[in-house]
Image (cartoon, rainbow, N blue to C red):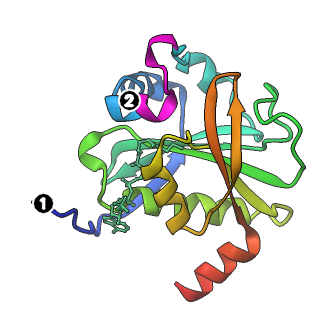
Amino acid sequence: MSLSRPDLSVVRLRPAVAADAAIMMRWDKAPHVVACLTDDPDHHEAADWDEELAAQSDVFSYFIAEVDGRPIGAMLDIDPAGEPNGYWGEIEPNLRALDIWIGEADALNRGHGTQMMTLALDACFARPLVEAVVIDPLNSNAQAHRFYQRLGFRPEGRRVFNGTDDCLVHRLTRADWAARRAGA
Ligand SMILES: CC(C)(COP(=O)(O)OP(=O)(O)OC[C@H]1O[C@@H](n2cnc3c(N)ncnc32)[C@H](O)[C@@H]1OP(=O)(O)O)[C@@H](O)C(=O)NCCC(=O)NCCS
């Protein structure tokens, strides 16, 4: 039996740039990433990373996580009420929505995801108007639910996105994050 051990490496988040398109494309093909994107991989549409990265703005931006200068994964930070594709539908203002994926399989289960989310949540709540952060893991992604709930997110309910993706929306309030940080 092998147990995952905490890794003391420091994770850094930096804005994603056009040159990251190739690595984002490669990570999209990793089986553990495909499994978090869709329950139906045969009918999943691949992202156009050149287009995605060129379209970034304050309502929609990607970050790359690096450990010792090596890119290991990515995050997406969205204003769900202002996002131009209307992915989140009717939703109140003053929220951020996050997504996270570690692309390099050998970087999983080392605490890097916890560090990435902690950095991103601190950045979200550094915006004074942000009241809560929402996330939309697939309902089938029990490992991600455990990961998010350990950070203080609470499940809110199932919701189908894009007509096909059965998700379990979670929310973390400013008060819950502040309490967690104060106790950390
Ligand atoms: C979800 C995801 C981001 C978590 O990242 P991670 O770096 O593997 O997560 P962590 O290492 O912080 O925690 C995962 C496990 O490692 C353990 N762990 C090891 N070292 C740890 C540390 N230093 N601190 C916290 N947990 C640690 C945790 O206890 C946890 O165990 P559990 O899942 O059995 O409860 C990652 O699994 C991933 O990218 N998955 C594929 C994409 C995905 O599902 N994204 C979510 C889409 S909504």
Identity of the residue furthest to the bottom in this view: 183
37 and 12: which is toward the camera: 37
Left or right, 149 with reference to 104: right
* Label 1, residues with CA under 10 Å away: few <14, some 14-19, many ≥20: few
Q: Which mark is residue 166?
A: none
At 47% from the left and 23% from the top, the residue drawn is 21
Q: Which residue is mark 2?
A: 27
- Whole-angstrom CA distance, mark 2 to mark 1, is 25 Å
Left or right, 84 with reference to 114: right
Residue 50, position in %: x, y?
55, 17
Identity of the residue furthest to the left in this view: 1
At 52% from the left and 48% from the top, the residue drawn is 14
Q: Is residue 35 magenta?
A: yes
Residue 148, position in %: x, y?
53, 59
At 74% from the left and 67% from the top, the residue drawn is 173
Residue 110, position in %: x, y?
29, 60
Relative to 76, residue 170 above or below: below
Relative to 183, residue 166 above or below: above
Which three-letter amino acid code belongs to the residue tagged 2?
Trp
Q: Which residue is mark 1?
A: 2
Between marks 2 and 1 in the image, the one whose residue lies nearer the viewer: 1
Which three-letter amino acid code belongs to the residue tagged 1?
Ser
| Magenta range | 34-43
Under circle 1, the secondary element is loop
16 and 41: which is toward the camera: 41
Under circle 2, the secondary element is helix
Main SS type for the magenta part? Answer: helix
Q: How many marks?
A: 2
Q: Earlier in the sequence, mark 2 or mark 1?
A: 1
Q: Is residue 68 magenta?
A: no
Relative to 12, residue 48 above or below: above
